[in-house]
Image: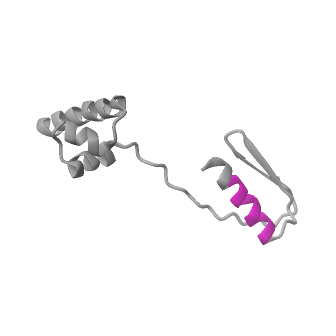
Amino acid sequence: MAEDAAKKQEWEQKQQAYEASGLTATAWCKENNEKLWTFKYWRQKLRAPVAKSVFKELTDTSDKDIEIRVGQITMRVAGEMEGRSAEKCLRAIRELIC
């Protein structure tokens, strides 16, 4: 376990050095005597995880409007909105936040 943590820290430092170098990954690896596939493996492993999308289907039989807030984006949807219109609005929000 300690060896894994040491290896991770080593590659974090190498990734920082690469980013500061301004070189391509291939050139940096050649200059630093590292295998490109190892470099790419650690680059991917150290990359911050991407949040996954969550879809929740809402069912509401009332005629009341609903309001959807995502960060600073607010969308008000009329209760009588048809499915296709709601779908278009949700796609627009997704494009704005992704």
Instruction: Relative to 81, say whether 6 is above or below.
Output: above
The residue depicted at 73 percent of the width and 43 percent of the height is 73
Q: Residue 26, percent across and down?
A: 28, 45
Q: Position of residue 74 (x, y in %)?
A: 76, 45
Q: Choose between 7 and 85: the one closer to the eye.
A: 7
Q: Is residue 92 magenta?
A: yes
Residue 78 forms part of the magenta stretch: no
At x 30%, y 35%, the residue is 15
Residue at 55% x, 57% y: name it.
54
Q: Position of residue 51 (x, y in %)?
A: 49, 49
Q: Is residue 42 left or right of residue 47?
A: left
Which residues are drawn in magenta? 83-93
- 86 to the left or right of 98: right
Depth check, front residue: 9 or 17: 17
Is 89 left or right of 71, judged from the image as shown? right
Image spot of residue 97 (x, y percent): 64, 48
| Front one among 83 and 89 | 89
Dominant secondary structure of the residues highlighted in magenta in the image: helix
Give above or below for 77 relative to 38: below
